[in-house]
Image: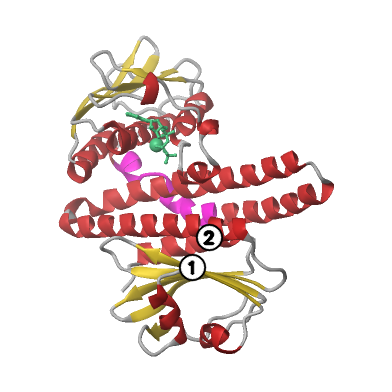
Amino acid sequence: MLAGSELWLLRLMADRGRALLDADTLLILVEEKGELRVGAHSGEGSVRLRIMPVQGSALGELYLTGRPLSLERPRGREAAWLHELGLEARAALAEPLSMEGHGGGLVIALRRGGGFRGPDRQALAAFAESVAQRLAAERSVEIKRLRFGMEARERERARWAREIHDETVQGLGALRLKLANAREAGDADAISGAVDAVLEGLGLEIEGLRHLIPELRPAALDDLGLRAAVEALARRAQAIDALDVSTEIDLTGVDGDGDGRLDPELESTLYRVVQEALTNVSRHAQASSAVVRVHVRDGAVRASVSDDGRGLPGGRVPDPAARSPEEQLKGGFGMSGMRERAELVGGELVVEPAPGGGTLVRLTVPLAGRAAAVAG
Ligand SMILES: Nc1ncnc2c1ncn2[C@@H]1O[C@H](COP(=O)(O)OP(=O)(O)OP(=O)(O)O)[C@@H](O)[C@H]1O
Ligand SMILES: [Mg+2]
């Protein structure tokens, strides 16, 4: 069975893939125990059968070839799998999904109007790869969640927080790319087409955010305060990524009634920056340990995350614009996200080589003029 969080992920990705390919319909199918199941369906038409046996169905046959397929005006035998699904199309693309050790599936894109071209096939292949990666990652998280049952709730929230970062930020990046490409092409039709596509895409992003907003603010912040929430992040990195994380948190310098609460916006900024910096350490640094510090002193709050890893590539933060469009779809927005968050609260973010090797991320936010702390 696909877990709820997996279905949710597939649904988000199906919407994203449909927008990316400008398709009328996009399906993501996942194989489970000899059956192909429609995990997500975005766009037109309704799917007649949501579960089909791999053996003995035309769709199963297509799946078992393990190869991409592109059809123009499919009919007769080659359209049999479309009929099984109860769908019609003028053009169809199918791309296998393969998740190492986590089974396989299919991504299918359909257009009612024109056909698909070479770049569309490449885009679908890249999209299928990212679906496979995300689903495999989700499944590993799922397995770990069972293993670390006690911290499940907190991890779930942290994961949704990443979801925003990965889904929305990347989605907006793709839209920006679409506009930039149209501007490059320079002709009025391309620009007006891109504006339409981007408008639709923005609609999807807004919709996606609406669903995620309730998940947005980590309950740990409100319930337990910044210290406990940051300590939970550290424990999470320790448990999931086997990173040795120590924390030094001193909030005694906060004005007010001495409970160490900053205003909610600032607390969530600090939390998010520490979260992204720790995620980067886990993903990129090959570090064995990290230190998280949060101090309030001299009228400013300072947070830092340092690691003992291999350091930034070339000793500096890579330029996101230097990434290829495919890479941009996969990420590279974490650093700018941290910087933007810092600026929104009037602070500054610096990323630099750490004194003893590795990387140091520093956030400084002056407290002067901020709203009074809200008691927790
Ligand atoms: N602690 C670190 N140690 C080594 N390299 C790092 C570290 N943090 C970031 N990097 C490098 O900087 C790049 C940019 O980081 P950034 O967080 O912006 O993007 P990302 O983590 O690749 O993708 P995402 O948008 O999903 O966060 C990374 O791809 C990595 O090469
Ligand atoms: Mg990152």
In this orientation, does residue 255 appear?
A: no
Q: What span is colored magenta in the figure? A: 208-223
| Type of amino acid at the residue the image marks with label 1 | Pro
Circles 1 and 2 in contact, beta carbons < 8 Å: yes
Q: Is residue 209 magenta?
A: yes
**Residue at x 51% of width, y 29% of height:** 340
Mark 2, residue position: 124
**Residue at x 27% of width, y 55% of height:** 141
Residue 53 falls in image quadrant: bottom left
**Residue at x 44% of width, y 63% of height:** 10
Foreground: 46 or 32?
Answer: 32
Q: Where is residue 250 in the image (x, y as percent from the top left)?
A: 25, 21
Residue 38 sits above or below residue 265 on the image: below
Residue 56 falls in image quadrant: bottom left
**Earlier along the polypeptide chain: callout 1 or callout 2?**
1
What label does residue 68 carry, if any? 1
Q: Does the magenta stretch include residue 112?
A: no
Residue 55 falls in image quadrant: bottom left
Count how many numbered circles sit on residues in the image: 2
Q: Position of residue 346 (x, y in %)?
A: 51, 21
Magenta: main secondary structure: helix
- Look at the image and tell me in which quarter the N terminus lies: bottom left
Q: Label 1 to label 2, Cα distance in Å?
A: 10 Å
